Amino acid sequence: MPAVPGISHVIFDLGQVLSLVDETVAVRAVVARSGRTETEVNTALFSPDRKRPLESGFQTWNEFSAMICSELALDMDDAEFRDVFTSVLTPNEPMFDIVRSLSRRFTLGCCSNTSGPHWEEIRASVPVTELFGPRILSFEVGSMKPDQQIYRALINACGVEPGQIVFIDDSPRNVESATAAGIRALLFTGVPNLERDLHALGIEWE
């Protein structure tokens, strides 16, 4: 049974919530192999125009990988480039105990703008993802936060009223758009503040 009347689901963003993201790690690795500037590599790999097709499912990983390696004249096979691309992720381990404790009282899930390789890396390195029921991943649903379509997908997957869902995200814009969809959204700025915000909703854990 839910610990708080009216709240049944707690949904997490992935990047910068359950897994920390540092894109400079990959940029520097590619710079060392390509001789291009950090600005050139960062634009090619991680600019919004480049990430959106991959993360919204309109471009396959193979297409993205081939495009980047060709553009930067990068001498890496797919496996090596994939390792570099996923090296930006580091598990945010202080979150794990909170997630495990919440799983005893709530249905948990995730809603994230991400790509196939990044999801596979997070699933392997963040063990608490095994506790998730609804998994709304932008590359699978063809929509990215802050678009309302992805929140509709989340609400449908949870099968409850929007106000029964607590959603935790590090982006103010995403929090605002989730709130507009009727979801109870919390801005993640670190574990202590998250604990405070959950307590304010009446959510306790052991």
Image (cartoon, rainbow, N blue to C red):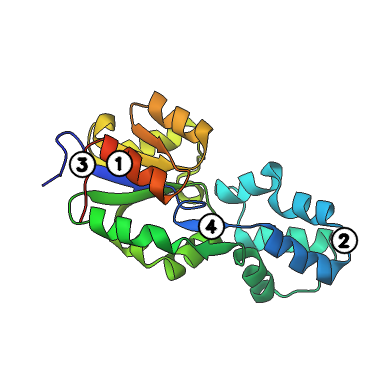
How far apart marks 4 and 1 lie (CA) works out to 21 Å
* Disc number lying in front (2 or 1): 1
Residue under the point 38% across and 50% down: 110
- Sequence order check: which comes first, mark 4 or mark 2? 4
The number of numbered discs placed on residues in the rendered structure image is: 4
How far apart marks 4 and 3 lie (CA) works out to 26 Å
Residue under the point 52% across and 31% down: 173
How far apart marks 2 and 1 lie (CA) works out to 45 Å
- Sequence order check: which comes first, mark 4 or mark 1? 4
Residue labelled with disc 2: 36
How far apart marks 3 and 1 lie (CA) works out to 13 Å
| Residue at the farthest top position | 180
Query: Of 60 and 45, which appears nearest the observer?
Result: 45
Q: Are marks 4 and 2 in contact (CB under 8 Å)?
A: no
How far apart marks 4 and 2 lie (CA) works out to 26 Å
- Sequence order check: which comes first, mark 2 or mark 1? 2
Image quadrant for the C terminus? Answer: bottom left
**Residue type marked 1:** Leu
Q: Position of residue 199 (x, y in %)?
A: 27, 40
| Residue at the farthest left position | 1
Residue labelled with disc 1: 198
- Sequence order check: which comes first, mark 3 or mark 1? 3
**Residue type marked 2:** Arg
Q: Are marks 3 and 1 in contact (CB under 8 Å)?
A: no
How many residues crowd mark 2 within 10 Å: few (<14), some (14–19), many (20+)?
some
Considering the numbered disc 3 on the image, is that residue within a helix, a strand or a loop? loop
**Residue type marked 3:** Ser
Residue labelled with disc 3: 8
- Sequence order check: which comes first, mark 3 or mark 2? 3
Q: Disc number at residue 20?
A: 4
Residue under the point 51% across and 51% down: 16
Considering the numbered disc 1 on the image, is that residue within a helix, a strand or a loop? helix
